Image (cartoon, rainbow, N blue to C red):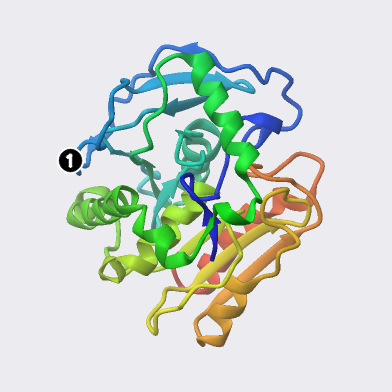
Amino acid sequence: MRWIRGVGGLIAASAAAATMPASAQDARMTTMEAPAEPNAVPLRTGPVKGQAAPEAWFKQYGVAMTRNVSSATLTPFLPDPATATGAAAIVAPGGGFLMLSMENEGWRVAKALADRGVAAFVLKYRLKPTPADMNAFEQAVTAMFASVGKPQSRLSPDAAIAGLSDQIADGRAAVALVRSRAAEWGVDPQRIGMIGFSAGAMTTMATALAAPETRLAFVAPIYGSMEAVKVPADAPPLFGVLAADDPLFARKGFGLIDAWQQAGRPVEFHLYQAGGHGFGLGKHGTTSTGWFDSFLHWLDTNGLLKRR
């Protein structure tokens, strides 16, 4: 894989409605009160180096997002015990490592998983510092988008992962926490996987590749980079999703999928005709709305949803 320098290249935010429903009209970022997060469990992975501005929440395209996260947390969304399968998924929202699309790619996805019997845990991982002033923040996001696609902004996989030590540590801590409380949360410790969106897809893949001791049962990069990586011999099964009109990652080949296949590891890939980037559970009016059911079917077919 190659990712964009500084923001990882897996951008899921802001200009051009990257992470928001396409039908929404209000692109302005508006501040909001921090929501109550009574079930959020601190991961205690430490602060962000150089972090100055406090964590702040805002809305864009009508959904909640956060930035300047310096203390990682994990929020459980547990299924009804009567329908629980024992499977679990760490959910990593996107946002270019400058913000997190908590509602569109976190809470909604976690609730959908819990409704289908999968214990879900939204990972609010640490981010790069951004200006406290909203106007200055918007300018920083605009500058981030301006760098996308420039050859000098692209990094090798190893170099990109080396810059994600905070996110990898948060991913590792999330898996360790769920495994340590597996009995309490009704989770099979051998069936914990990770699903991520855009920058969250990079966090997912970086955790799997750089921290194999997490022993993930599956990885699901949703509209993440499709460039090739070196696949470990014991890499987990992979489920990938991308829209053919994704402005960031389409029309650049499918090296990630090819690499997984050439390594002899289980892989399934869905390329949808339309959906753009940042469609969450699916963009209305496109076939991208089918990916979630396909994902659940894949988990089931691989024996990950069988109650034990």
Residue 36 visible at all = yes
Q: Quadrant of residue 256?
A: bottom right
Against 113, residue 126 (above or below) is above
In front: 190, or 196?
Answer: 196
Q: Residue at x 71, y 48 (%)?
A: 289
* 292 vs 255: above or below: above
Looking at the image, which residue is at 23% across and 58% down?
179
Give the quadrant of the N terminus.
bottom right
Q: Compare residues 83 and 186 and report the one nearer the observer.
A: 186
Question: Within the image, what quadrant is residue 194 found in?
Answer: bottom left
Considering only vertical position in the picture, is 38 above or below 283? above
Residue 172 pos. (x, y %): 27, 56
Q: Is residue 221 left or right of residue 282?
A: left
Q: Amino acid at mark 1?
A: Arg
Q: Position of residue 45 (x, y in %)?
A: 20, 44
Query: What's the residue at 35%, 41% (across, down)?
Result: 125
Q: Foreground residue, 152 or 210?
A: 152
Q: Position of residue 65 (x, y in %)?
A: 49, 27
* Residue designated by label 1: 44
Quadrant of the frame with the C terminus = bottom left
Binning the other alpha carbons within 10 Å of mark 1 as few (below 14), some (14 to 19) or many (20 upward) gives few
